[in-house]
Amino acid sequence: MSAKPLAASSLGLSQVGPGGVVYGVVDGFLAQIQLVGPRRKAQRLEVLFRHEGEGKEQEIRRALFEAPETKASGIKAKDVVIDSKTVRLTIRQGFLDLPDEKVILARVRALLAALAAVSSPGPQTCRSCGSASPAEVLVVKGVVDRLCPSCVERIEDEIRRAAAEYESRTANLPVGFVYALVAGAAGGAIYGGVMIATNRMLWMLAILTGVMVGYAAVKGAGKGGAVVQGMAAVVTVISVLAGLLAFIGYAAEQHLAAQGKAIDWALFLARSPQILISAREDSLFSLAGGIFGAVYAIKRARHPEFVPLRSPEKSSAGGNLLPG
């Protein structure tokens, strides 16, 4: 998301990194804030602070939830994750929208006060090599961190070389197609098998099929891209409809067997388009599920992003939330 998250400016954060992460330094602690969810409609706001408090995780949690400010702000235990290096606060969307900015800031203040009382920001050194030379604040693998100029250049060079190597690949479409078909056959078998066992159609299995096909298509082709995405989407939809067709065939076979008759599978397959059309609601439901699965297949088969560490936007000097 390109828009800066709610409360980022009030925290003194202005530098934007990959995925719309807004980051910087707050009261000496490396901090980041990010909207997580579908575009135009955030599902949650995630606030993260880095610290150096190995072995103090329970003490930090105790300090946080014993403070009256925590209860007043509405922080819940399930929304706070603490480990030896980071503290993460999740602020969830209500019925219509995220809480008011004042509520968000109150929760962040309560969290930061508990963190500052127990832990520390740690030394301002490069986390990669430990160098004491002036370190730059950047987002590395989704988490705000400090890196010295040498390590920044090294990692930037690795990113450039990885991007160039990926671009130089030629997609092996025949192998990708075979891989996609195998994954699609497995997904369709699961979709149809569950219908036979439970007499229910589950979209989650159509989505699973899409994920499987997308992953397999990229694995076989050696790279993602528009052609691989299109191939994965088509195979996913066909696989889900094939699973429904298997269920219809099983039901027809059972019906005929009860009458002492046998099904003509060659005729059944020849007339499969008409059979799917006559199934109406079941076919529409499975088609919709297949389309949802295809969306996930497209996501899995997309071209990866090689994002540089340095943001084009300049960072602020950081902010202060605690008094003093």
Image (spheres, rainbow, N blue to C red):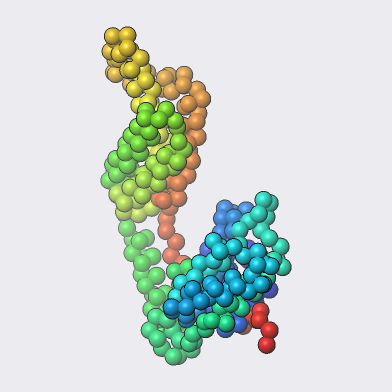
Q: Quadrant of the N terminus?
A: bottom right
Give the residue drawn at x 61%, y 78%: 113
In the rendering, at what x and y percent does residue 215 appear? Answer: 36, 49
Comparing 113 with 102, the one in front is 113
Q: Is residue 263 visible?
A: yes
Up the image or down, 266 lies above or below 57; here it is above
Up the image or down, 154 lies above or below 239; here it is below
Q: Is residue 105 left or right of residue 184?
A: right
Give the residue drawn at x 52%, y 82%: 119
> Looking at the image, how many numbered discs can be counted on the residues?
0
Q: Quadrant of the C terminus?
A: bottom right
Q: Is residue 221 visible?
A: no
Give the residue drawn at x 27%, y 46%: 175
Tell me the quarter of the picture where residue 185 sits: top left
Give the residue drawn at x 36%, y 67%: 162
In the rendering, at what x and y percent does residue 20 appear? Answer: 56, 65
In the rendering, at what x and y percent does residue 177 appear? Answer: 32, 42
Comparing 57 with 214, the one in front is 57
In the rendering, at what x and y percent does residue 134 appear? Answer: 48, 89
Comparing 38 with 119, the one in front is 119
